[in-house]
Image (spheres, grey):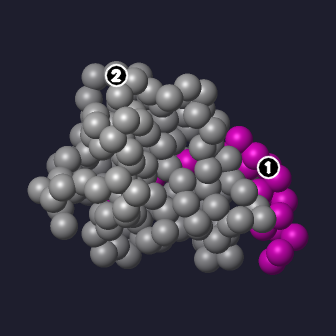
Amino acid sequence: MSVTLGPVAGRPTEGTPFYSISDHAFNFDLKEIPEGAGHQGHVALLLNTLGIEVAIASSRCLYVSGYCPAMGWTMTRLAPPAASFGALSASSESRLVSGTGMPVDSGPWIERFDPSTGWFCSGREETEVSTVAVEFATDTQVVLHQGRLLEVWIRPMNWEELARSIGDAR
């Protein structure tokens, strides 16, 4: 199933990304529901069990959430790419069905975390020369190559607590 992502005119979704240590999951507290985001429901574009929530009515990507246990992350130095601020849109050849998940593709997705900066990245091993980075929600970015998702970056507001809990567990 093919999904294409791309920047569109608009503001990033405002809110607070955070990591629930007890649930092993990323979540996002919306400041307000973006216009056109709710009346037809949402679909999740899945990278393993982490999902980009997409409003079906507008095709707008809202935020990232989902189960993503820190036990499998690689600890390393990370620096997110310079990103433009704006909205992100998803399009698919298949019909989007509310409440479902749709794999972006088979991956593999490598999960990394920088405990000194709080940045988490789920991405591919390969890199592309020409990429576009978009911050489409507060402290949440994607890196794209010709509409194909290469990386998702998240900096949860409770990253210092998360870094301590990972350090204590290892």
Seen in the picture, residue 125 relative to 58 is either above or below; the reply is below
Q: CA distance from mark 1 to mark 2?
A: 31 Å
In terms of image quadrants, where is residue 120?
bottom right
Which-is-in-front pick, marks 1 and 2? 2
In this picture, residue 12 sits left or right of residue 102 = right
Few, some or many C-alpha atoms within 10 Å of disc 1 (few <14, some 14-19, many ≥20)? some
Image vertical order of residue 45 relative to residue 58, above or below: below
Which x, y percent locates residue 86? 37, 27
Sequence-first tag of 1 and 2:
2
Question: Residue 5 placed where, x, y %?
Answer: 25, 46
Amino acid type at circle 2 is Gly
Bounds of the magenta segment:
150-170
**Magenta stretch contains residue 161:** yes
Q: Label 1 amino acid?
A: Glu
Q: Nearer the viewer, residue 112 or 42?
A: 42
Residue lying at 26% horizontally and 45% vertically, measured from the top left = 90
Of all residues shown, which one is farthest toward the left?
93
Provide residue 6's location: percent of width, then percent of height: 24, 40
